[in-house]
Amino acid sequence: MSYTQKALAAASALLMGSSAVAAPLVLEGNYVKIGVNDAGTVGSGGATSPGILYDSTGTSTFNPSYDYLTPGNPFEGFTVKGIDTDGTTVLFNYYNNNNSVGGAQITGTLVDKSGVEYRGLTFDNRAVWSGSVTEFDIEHDYRFNDNQQFVDINTRLEFKIDVPTLYFGRFTDPDARAAAGDSSSTLNVRGYAGGVPATNVVLSEALASKYALGLFTAATNSNTGISAGWSTDPLTYYGGQDDGDGDYTIGMAFMFSGINTGDIINIQYAYIFGPSSYDAASGAVAGGAGGSTSSSFTVSDVGSASAPTAAPATPTLVSTATAPSTTLPVLTVTLTEHTASEDSGVQTIKRDHTANTTTPMVTTDTYSDGSTTSTLSNSVSTTRSSDSLSGRVDQHEVLDKIGGGFRGLLNHTPSSGNDKVRVFSKNYLGWSSADNGYTGNSKIFGGGFEIDVKPTWTVGAQYNNMSVNLDGTDSTSKLHSNHYGLFSMLRGNTLSLRTNVGLSQNAYSVSRNVAGVFNNDSATNGQEWWLNNRVYWHVNKKVTPFLGYTVGGYQRDAFSESGSVQSARNVAGVNKTTHTGEAGVSVAHRFGGKKNSDFGVGLEASVNTDADLQVVAAVDYKETVFLEGIHQIQDGVNNSAVSAKVKFRF
């Protein structure tokens, strides 16, 4: 890397590292010692040791002067890049580097998992970094046992959007120095001529000692590269760029296509070490690094990766024995696919579980010259099962049923008298029960005024505030309404006409779960209007039959739920017009005659064309203080309420 490039990189690191960061973690075995930092990359941040240390003797004797990462301008990081269907438009491009700790493009949390079972596995040394951005969640799992000469990494990505093409890249500037004569310049090679192709390993060798550091994987969707320009673009490495020897970066990239929302991918790869390229490559395959097995590669010793020699004559195979590994764990991984469907207000999440149990098997071959080789294979058994989880998704509809019944109580019937102006208040407390275990409580507070335009004609206006709280076994929901109304009463000896015009502005909020496993929240708004006309027939002073008709409009905005992506719903808006007829009878009586009629009682019962029933019982004192009891039955919902009203006459 040129002096100018290094100066720019150092300035960038200084600026990006200015924010406060969490302390790095140090993982140490017998052969390998590394730092893992708050940016989710290898290294303790910048030139702080340890970066990457290796001891070929396996005695945990680590010399900070021979750190593979920290000399000069340390460089180790990763990039996640998404491309749209046209093959050129970049959906996202996130880059984290050891030098950008405190200014990383993906922020996350670092946890020490050494010796702790996590995702079905336990390792002597382990650190897990988890981060999140708008498009995906990411996890880097760094792990190795004390006697391993590689650092295995599993990168897990869970997607929140569709990604037509994904590239993931990992890269480092390997300052492989283990003895006098080594420097920051290295001999860089894609592939090892002894059996590992350039798509699966890239190695850097120290100039004098030939100590090797490399990136390795057994994946089939990978490629490697060597960049003189310290590239962070995964396409540089996936395209196989090879700039040769020098103080360059080596990198590895993976490509995935057709990723859907909710998909989870795991990328397995490893940093490998050895006193030679052969030791690094063969040790990685034998140890199962980067997802490898005995069938992945057959590695033979051809010496230096940068100057391979002819392989020695192959001895004769004498015997072969296969047995379960005594050092590697049996791994069980369960993958779950989710399918969501809805029917009759119920969402069902069908889950299909596939459990793969992998038993590492070691095959030992003994040859005629007395040498032995060991290869690792996996014995895999698969079991499948399925289940389904259900939860209600009809909270908005139930809220509307409860609110619709109580909104009908807001149609106002004005009184008459010698006074021309009257001011009244309305206060309701209601409770409800509905199908599927729903219960609700409601409150209405409001009031208005009446004006006698003529002795036989009264008009007025009102405002009411209504709130409904709905609880279910799997949800908590709320409806808040602001109601504005105008009314009129034309009185005759035989017939009277009552007219009410209403407008309600509604706000909904719903928090629901599916069997306590998936959780989603939503909020939306709506409004409704109605025009109600009711004609009263004055049969006598006590009994008054009536007929009514209501036309109305209802609208609720579309919304999208937040929360668990497996159960999140996109719900279309609602816009409809309704027509409802009603018939009923009102019975009233005042006690004490005209001069002493302080108390009155009334009973009103009605049924509408939707087969909904309503009964209202009332008592008043001088038509000034009113107490009411109400019960409604409509479309699977039972509403009950009590009301206290006060009217002031002027």
Image (cartoon, helix red, strand yellow):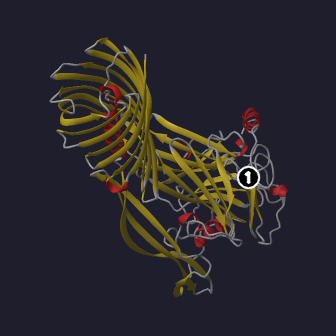
Q: Callout 1: 10 Å neighbours few (<14), some, many (20+)?
A: many
In terms of image quadrants, where is residue 18?
Answer: top right
Q: What element does badge 1 sit on? A: loop
Foreground: 493 or 7? 493
In terms of image quadrants, where is residue 281?
Answer: bottom right
- Location of the C terminus by quadrant is top left
Q: Residue at x 52, y 41 (%)?
A: 134
Q: Is residue 333 left or right of residue 368?
A: left
Please count the marks in the image.
Answer: 1
Q: Amino acid at mark 1?
A: Gly
Q: Position of residue 3 (x, y in %)?
A: 76, 35
Residue designated by label 1: 43
Foreground: 234 or 571? 571
Q: Is residue 592 above or below residue 355?
A: above
Foreground: 429 or 263? 429
Q: Is residue 541 above or below residue 306?
A: above
Q: Position of residue 619 (x, y in %)?
A: 35, 37
Q: Is residue 229 left or right of residue 175?
A: left
Q: Is residue 588 above or below residue 200?
A: above
Q: Is residue 232 visible?
A: no
User: Residue placed farthest to the top in the image?
Assistant: 453
Q: Position of residue 190 (x, y in %)?
A: 59, 54
Q: Residue at x 56, y 43 (%)?
A: 133
- Location of the N terminus by quadrant is top right
Q: Residue at x 39, y 42 (%)?
A: 642
Q: Position of residue 318 (x, y in %)?
A: 53, 88
Foreground: 199 or 638? 638
In terms of image quadrants, where is residue 649?
Answer: top left
Q: Is residue 473 left or right of residue 251?
A: left
Q: Is residue 161 left or right of residue 555?
A: right
Q: Is residue 317 visible?
A: yes
Q: Is residue 367 above or below residue 620?
A: below
